[in-house]
Amino acid sequence: KAMAKLSVGFVGWRGMVGSVLMERMLKEKDFDGSYNPFFFTTSNVGGKGPDVGIDAPPLLDAFDIKELGKMNIVLTCQGGDYTNEVHPKLRATGWDGYWIDAASALRMKDNAIIVLDPVNRATIDQGLKDGVKDYVGGNCTVSLMLMGLGGLFEKGWVEWMSSMTYQAASGAGAKNMRELVGQMEAIGAVDPALKDPRGDILGLDRAVTTVMTADSFPTDNFGAPLAGSLIAWIDKAVDDGQTKEEWKGVAETNKILNTTERIPIDGCCVRIGSMRCHSQALTIKLKRDIPMSEIEAAIAAHNEWVEVVPNTKEDTLKRLSPAAINGTLKVPVGRLRKMNIGPEYLTCFTVGDQLLWGAAEPVRRMLNIALESLKK
C-alpha cells in the first residue's frame, strides 16, 4: 500500500519573506506533487490560495489549531507574535509535527535548532535523529556572515570577530522599504535649478538638509531620516550597551555552530539606505598566522554560493555591493587582507541578500530536509 502523502501547512506566505519563499519554491520546482500543500491565512479564510501549479484547497484559518494539527509540517513566515500565540497551543494538543519558522521567537529555545544548511547541516541531521521538532531561521546578518565565512569557522581558525554592519531597509519590513523610497522622493523633489551641474552646490546641500529635518519628512517607521543618512541603532537595548541585533551576533553564531567553547563576537549594527541587501565589515582575530592563499581557499571551498572577490577597485565596484547581488544567492567576500595590527588579524567585507540567505532560503532548505526525513 502506498504511503499517504505528507501535508505541509504554509502560514505568512503573502508577506515579504513569504513571497520570496514562494518565488524560490516555484523556481526550484519544490511544489512537485510529492506532498499536499495547505495555505493558511489570518485574514481571508475560504479565499483562493496562491497559484503553485497544483490544486490546493481554499485558504484555512491560521489560528485553527485543529486544522494546523492535521499537518505533518507547518512552515510559518507570519512573524513572532503569531508564533508566540499559536505554537504553544498547537504543541499542547500533543502535535509532534515539524514547526519551521522564519521568525526569531523560538531561536534561542533549548529544544529548537537554528537552521543554516549548508553551514550546520550535521547539527540539523542530528536534531532530526534526536527528535527535535522546532527548526528556526537565524538572524539575517548572522546567516549571511556564516555563509560568507563558514570556511574559516569550519577550520577552527577564528579566535574572535568584530562585525560592523550596513543593514538594508528590508530588515525592518515592507513599510520601512516604502518609507525609504518616500524619503528618496522627498529629497529628489528639491528645486531642480539647484541640481544643475553649474548650480549652487551649498544651496543644494542646505535644501536637502531642510527637507530631511522638516516635520513633514516621512519617518513614522524608522523614527529618523535614512535616505541620505544612516541610523546607528537596530532593535531594542540589551545589557552592556548593546542592541539586541548586536547581541544576536554572538548568541546565534555560537548556537548555529554548536560551539563547545564560545567564540566572542561583537560590533555595531547600522541601518543604511540599501533596499534589501545587508553588508558587513569584519575584523577577525585568527588563532595563528595563516597564509592568505589558505584563507581564500578555505572561504571559497565552503559552499557553492560564496565568492572570493579580488581586492582591487575594479572588482570591488563591480561585484561587492548590494546593487551587484540584489535578488541573487551569491555571497561575495572581498577586501580580504591582513591588517597592520598583526599577521593574525584579518579584515574583509561581505554582502548578501537579506531576504534570501538572510530569511527565506534557510527555511526552504529545511522544509526539503524535513520532507526527506519523513519519507524515509
Image (cartoon, rainbow, N blue to C red):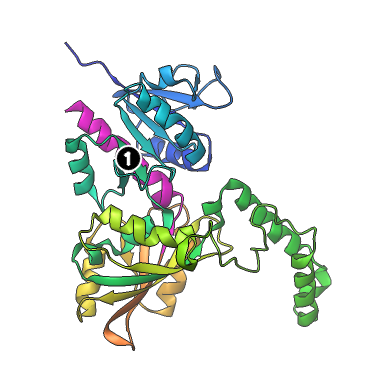
Quadrant containing the C terminus is top left
Please provide percent x and percent y for residue 210. 79, 70
Please provide percent x and percent y for residue 178. 64, 50
- Residue at the spot 66% in from the left edge and 53% down from the top edge: 179
Identify residue for label 1. Answer: 135
Q: Does 358 appear in magenta?
A: yes
Give the quadrant of residue 97. top left
SS for callout 1: strand
Indicate the amino acid at tag 1: Tyr
Please provide percent x and percent y for residue 347. 35, 77
Residue 36, placed above or below residue 251 = above
Task: Report the side of 354 relative to 114 (left or right).
Answer: right
Magenta: main secondary structure? helix
**Residue lying at the far top of the rendered structure:** 1
Choose between 375 and 24: the one closer to the eye.
375
- Residue at the spot 30% in from the left edge and 71% down from the top edge: 160
Residue 67, placed above or below residue 22 = above
Residue 211, placed above or below residue 43 = below
Residue 169, placed above or below residue 202 = above
Please provide percent x and percent y for residue 163. 40, 69
Task: Report the side of 129 relative to 246 (left or right).
Answer: left
Quadrant containing the N terminus is top left
Tell me where the magenta segment starts and ends, as one range: 351-376
